[in-house]
Amino acid sequence: MRPIAGEGTPEGTWRAWSAPDRWPALPLDPPGPPLVVAPHPDDEILGVAGLMSVLGSADLAAVTDGEASHPGSFVHTPEELAAIRRAETDEALRRLRIDGTVFRLGQADGAIDEDRLAADLTKLLTPGRWCLVTWRGDGHPDHEAAGRAAARACAETGARLLEYPIWTWHWAYPDDPDVPWQRARRIDLPPAAQAAKAAAIAAFPSQIEPLGPAEADAAILPPHVLARFARPFEVIFE
């Protein structure tokens, strides 16, 4: 796992890096609606909302309800926060205006059962279907567990594994040898998709705004984090 603390690598450092200009574009030719796997509500929006908007359809496998995002806060109970985050996901998808089904898998935030998840995803995947999931090296334990489970399910079904980084942009740095940049593929977003993604991100006030005045109520996604997801392109590892 990686320490996700402080402000991480500044977005200005990433924007000054020339390598993304040379990454191949991902051909947008899925055989049908992709399955997007989100360990927590908002992961799918941060990582690939632009792609989802461009494609116009996607199914979502919501692994957890994100009830543990603020473990020291007393503003909401875990059950209340789970309900809030489910509603935020629904609103974000509405703002993206995409067709698809949400499969809520009901796992515990912070304690994903990989065997169970792999079995659930196997039921939703078919040969050639795109499976978009958080990268197996992303640094967050739930993100990595979801990635590993999806990789197993893709291997079993013949689905196509496409991994999207989230917290990598925080702890990594340009040309970091621990990141598989050679597998990076770029998805350029037209203005309409960029606007749709921004609107979808704004549908998560429980994450982008403080829940209350205490330190434990702080925003999980403050401005310096959100800046990494306001780029005119998205990145997946193929």
Image: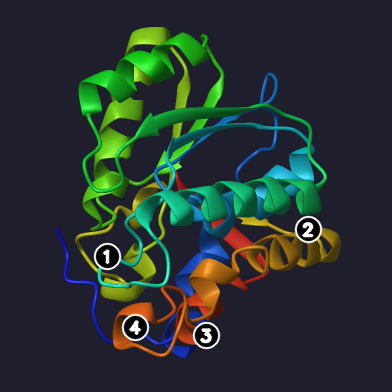
Name the residue type under label 1. Pro
Q: Which residue is mark 2?
A: 193
Is 10 drawn above or below residue 221 in the view shown?
A: below
Q: Which mark is residue 9?
A: 4
Mark 2 neighbour density, 10 Å: few (under 14) some (14–19) many (20 or more): many
**Real-space Cα distance between discs 4 and 3?**
13 Å
Q: Which residue is mark 1?
A: 71
> What residue is drawn where x is 17% and y is 65%?
2
Q: Which residue is mark 3?
A: 223
> How many labels, in total?
4
Whichever of callouts 1 and 4 sits on the residue coming sooner in the sequence is: 4
> What residue is drawn where x is 53% and y is 48%?
83
Q: Secondary structure at mark 4?
A: loop
Residue 12 appears in view: yes
Is 184 drawn above or below residue 161 in the view shown?
A: below
Name the residue type under label 2. Ala
Task: Tell which tag, 4 or 3, sits nearer the viewer.
Answer: 3
Residue 94 in percent (x, y) is at 78, 47
In-image side of 7 versus 103 (left or right): left
Whichever of callouts 4 and 2 sits on the residue coming sooner in the sequence is: 4
> What residue is drawn where x is 69% and y is 44%?
52
- Check contact, mark 3 vs mark 1: CB within 8 A: no
Whichever of callouts 4 and 3 sits on the residue coming sooner in the sequence is: 4
Name the residue type under label 3. Pro
Mark 1 neighbour density, 10 Å: few (under 14) some (14–19) many (20 or more): few
**Real-space Cα distance between discs 2 and 3?**
20 Å
Residue 14 in percent (x, y) is at 45, 80
Name the residue type under label 4. Thr
Residue 82 in percent (x, y) is at 46, 49
Q: Secondary structure at mark 1?
A: loop
**Real-space Cα distance between discs 2 and 1?**
33 Å
